[in-house]
Image (cartoon, rainbow, N blue to C red):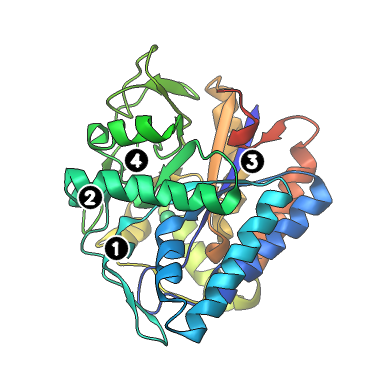
Amino acid sequence: MQIFLTYDYELFFGNPTGTVEKCIIEPTNKLREISEETGVNFVFFIDVGYIKKLGEYKDQFPKVEKEYKKVVKQIKTLVFEGHDCQLHIHPHWEDCTHDGEKWNMVTDRYKLDDFSDDEIDSIVKEYHSILENLTEKKVTSYRAGGWCLQPFDRVKSSFEDIGIKLDSTVFPGGKFTEGNYYYNFVNTPDQGRWRFSNDLTIEDTSGPFWEYPIASFYYNPLFFWKLFALGRMFPDDHKPIGDGYPMSSPGLRKKMLTTGIRLSASVDGYFITKLNKVLRVNQDLGYDEMVVLGHPKACTKFALKKLREFILKNKNKHSFLTFADLDI
Ligand SMILES: [Zn+2]
């Protein structure tokens, strides 16, 4: 099995967004320590809209300048150490401002589909070039912010122009169309990866793009009751390191606690307890690939410990890779 441990490198998008130190720098450094010990590298999907906005405000506000320098330095370090820094777009940054103290988040236009064709093309190209300039590497892989990349034909030509070859946004069976979100992955090929052209969820064996779907897992209500209880009872181990609040997802918490929900398989917090099971499921399905999703901001002390154990247990049985390791 090829295992890809992927982390979306970003702040929270609610109010407050949390600090760069707690949401990004500190937990990412903990991941770097695990990488150094185990020899396994990670994929970091960098929220480039954030970097763009830091760049815009850094000369105006000393606080932003410090934040900008920390993030740029850490990303350069990640690249130097062999981690794979790829493109993650949350286009709502276009509408966000900084007042010298904090970010004022506006998330009405949360997904690329909320923008015009010209805006989509210029956002995708500008963010891609910001990241390539920063990493001094070719950026060829993509993950959409909030899993929102449909309808894909609205971004297809921009992706082709800049040389995106791989997407890792889909998680089979996932669907959420409330609030600012729209994704529908109810029907997808029953494969560990597939080629596509106009639609992320339809295989086209001669298509120009590869989909490396995130593994998918049904988390039952009991799981969420435990997760919320542990956070209250043992905050030191189970509270996320990140100190911000997520954007609202209407009805999601209720769904979690009553019917359970199918989500992308995650290494965040208590979700990591299902990682061995996710691996078995992917093996039983006959897949050769398993992508799992995490966020530095959602790392807990408990999750970092379990991640280390998972890697040490599996690194001789499976290959831990990044997308840059693939020859596609
Ligand atoms: Zn994101």
In the image, residue 30 lies at what x, y percent?
A: 71, 63
Q: x, y (%) of residue 203? A: 35, 18
x, y percent for residue 39: 80, 44
**What's the distance in space between the residues labelled 1 and 2, CA to CA?**
10 Å
Q: CA distance from mark 3 to mark 1?
A: 39 Å
Kindly identify the residue that appears in the image at 57 percent across and 61 percent down.
Answer: 296
Find numbered disc 4 in the image and state the secondary structure of the residue it sits on.
loop
Kindly identify which numbered label has been placed on residue 119: 2
Neighbour tally class for label 4: few under 14, some 14-19, many 20 plus, Cα within 10 Å = many
Tell whether 321 sits left or right of 22.
right
Q: Earlier in the sequence, mark 1 or mark 2?
A: 1
User: Residue type at mark 1?
Assistant: Glu
Foreground: disc 3 or disc 1:
1
In space, the residues marked 2 and 4 are separated at their CA atoms by 27 Å
* Real-space CA distance between mark 2 and mark 3, rounded to the nearest whole angstrom: 42 Å
Q: Which one is nearer the viewer's eye here, 16 or 221?
A: 16
Q: Which mark is residue 276?
A: 3
Quarter of the figure that contains the N terminus = top right
Q: Is residue 54 above or below residue 268?
A: below
* Residue that lies at the very extreme toward the left in this rendered image: 116
Task: Please state which of the two labelled residues, at mark 4 or mark 1, is closer to the viewer.
Answer: 1
Name the mark on residue 94. 1
Find residue 75 and report its horizontal and vertical position in percent. Answer: 61, 58
Residue name at image x 81 percent, y 32 percent:
316
Answer yes or no: do the residues labelled 1 and 2 have beta carbons within 8 Å? yes
Please name the residue shown 80% across and 52% down the image. Answer: 36
Instruction: Looking at the image, tell me whether mark 2 or mark 4 is earlier in sequence order.
Output: 2
> Which sits earlier in the primary sequence, circle 3 or circle 1?
1
